[in-house]
Every structure is written in C-alpha cells, then in structure tokens.
Image (spheres, grey):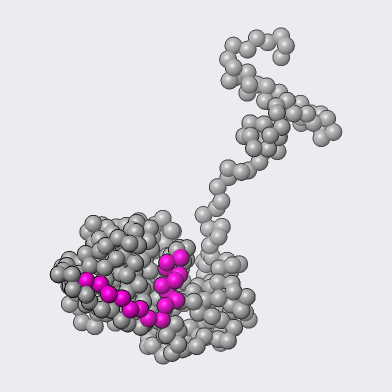
Amino acid sequence: MSGVKCLNRKKCKALLCLTALSAAVLTGCGGLSYDMVYNVDSQVSSFNVVNRQDRNVAAPFASDLCVVTEDVRDDESVDMTLADAAILFDLNRQQILYAKNAHTSLYPASLTKVMTALVALENGSLDQTLTATSAVNITESGAQLCGVKSGDTMTLDQALRILLIYSANDVAMMIAENIGGTVEHFVEMMNDEARRLGATNTHFVNPNGLHDPEHYTTAYDLYLIFNEATRYDTFNEIIQMSDYQTVYYDKNGKEKTFDKTTTNLFVRGDYKPPSNVTVIGGKTGTTAAAGHCLMLLSRDSGGLPYISVILGSDGTETLYAQMIDLLGEINK
C-alpha cells in the first residue's frame, strides 16, 4: 500500500479493511492482528469485521410464539366432540399441548372485544372522556347491554372495564366511535392490527362480535390477539376482576350507576379449574351462530402462563366442563 496514492478516502479505508481481513485469514489465529482500534461497540472495528457479530440481525417473527400446523390430540381424556375448535398453548416453552381445528374460520362472538380493548389501549388514553352517540342504540334481541344512552359520558378506563367484565355491546360501540372517529374506521384499525399480529384468517366488521357472516376468526388468531393484549397491565388487571362498580354521567351531568359481576364463571367462582392450575382471567362469548366460547389466561403450579381457547361449544355446562378437561393437560 505504501506505493499507492489514495485519491478517495472512503475507497482507501475500505481497501485497508479488506487488506487487514485478508492478512488475518492468511496468517491464521496465531498471527491475527487488528489494523483498526479494538472496540467491541464499533460496527467497523477489526474485531467486528473478523468475528462478524450479528447484533443487527432481526429475530424471526414467530420466535416467541406458539406455532401449530395440525391437530394435536394425543390425550383421549380431552373430549372436544361438542366443540368446533380448541387449543391449549404453553407460552413459556412455546409448546402446543392440544389443538383441534386451530385454523378453521369460526364466529368469535364477544371474544371480539379483546381486539376492541387492544386497539383502544394502543390508541387511546385511559383518562380520556368518551361520549356516547346514537351508535350505542342496539336493538338486537338478547344483546348484552350496559344501557348507555346518547350523551352519556365515561372515561376509557371505565368503558374498558365494562366492556371486558360485563361484555357490554353498546359500550363497545362507544369505545369504537370515540377512539376511531367512526365505528367504521375503528373496525379498519382492528383489521389492520390483526394483520400486524399475523392473524391473517381474521376479518372483523364490528367491535362487539354481534353476528355477521363476514365477521370471523380462528382459535389460533384469537391466541395471537389475546397474547398481545396481555402485554398491557390494565388488560391483565381487568380480566381478573370478579365484579365492577362505577358511576358515569348522562348528558345533563346526572350520575348513573353501574354494578355488575363478570361473565367469566371461573373468575366468579362458579366453576373450579384443576387443582394444579390457576385461572387468571379471560373473555367469554355467546351468540346463536357462534355457540358458547371461552378464552383464558392460566398459570400452572410454578406460575408459568398458558392460553386456552374453546369455540363453538353447545352449552354453558359443556363449555366449562370441556375447559376443565383441557386445563387438566397442564402439568401432566
């Protein structure tokens, strides 16, 4: 190099680096020398050139996710003949303990509200005030309602608790319109979030899960959505609550009282999980088309987390009996 005049500093530096690297390879480990300053933090030090550190390599998309490609039903003690789909995932080891029809498109009913809560937590502030409009006027027979009227106000924090604990369909509409600007735009946000999470077999048309033939998901996609929602402390706190009491206001500033228990019968104490399992919380859902649905976050005797989902069960008693059998696979 002493006889070469460098007219381009960048090219010269690159040439020096290549020369140093070639010398290191030819001389072997015993004769390795560094022509640049030794600095483990520098991207252009001889140390990093020779050792090719992979600090900037992105982690694979599913490196921390459970991945299921086929049914996993080794234990005959779990009877899911009266359910359309079911999964049980060990989150700590990314292990599939049970899977039936994990990728089959089904109606989610109010399990939809987990995505509603997730999008609201990502885009809203817990202390912001929501105002109801005529969008909350739901007339569908049997729909679970809080009873909010146009002009009523409450905070997002209050609304999320009513949404997840009592599964109020009218409050889902209230959240959607206030966070998304319109209900339609909020639903677009839900579908965008589903795609971001890899829930590619999901399509939402409303924020509450009331039946629509174009509103569908899968047990696996619900796992992806639920798993993401559990990253939020507020979500984890709410799904553990057995009841909720609060006061919100009508359009004239008059107090309105809300006092309801959870729809989750494990959290309420009506059903008990296996002795080695603690149910942290989750979400219920029921429509005539979807059947009875339940999604749970649970922990084993060592405190490690699991997500379970059952879709399309034929009744409340059957659903909870099935979930107890499914949770029995933990710690086996």
Residue at the image point whose x is 42% and y is 68% from the top = 235
Q: Residue furthest right?
A: 30
- Where 291 falls versus 95 (above or below)? below
Query: Residue 178 lies in what quarter of the image?
Result: bottom left
Q: Nearer the viewer, residue 284 or 38?
A: 38
User: x and y percent of residue 214 in the render?
Assistant: 28, 67
Q: Residue furthest front?
A: 254
The quadrant of the image that shows the C terminus is bottom right
The N terminus lies in quadrant: top right
Horizontal and vertical percent for residue 11?
A: 60, 19
Task: Please count the marks in the image.
Answer: 0
Q: Nearer the viewer, residue 38 or 321?
A: 38
Where are the magenta residues, as a range? 233-249
Q: Is residue 68 left or right of residue 194?
A: right
In the rendered view, does 5 fall on the left or right side of 242?
right
Q: Nearer the viewer, residue 254 or 32?
A: 254
Can residue 184 be seen from the camera position used here?
no
Residue 127 at least partly seen = yes
Q: Is residue 246 magenta?
A: yes
Q: Quadrant of residue 240?
A: bottom left
Q: Is residue 45 magenta?
A: no
Q: Position of residue 307 (x, y in %)?
A: 50, 72
Q: Is residue 27 above or below residue 117?
A: above
**Residue at image location 63% in from the left, 34% down from the top:** 42
Above or below, 71 relative to 316: above
Task: Please state if 212 lies on the left or on the right of 43 as rendered.
Answer: left
- Locate residue 15, reporting x and y percent: 65, 21
Q: Residue at x 33, y 58 (%)?
A: 124
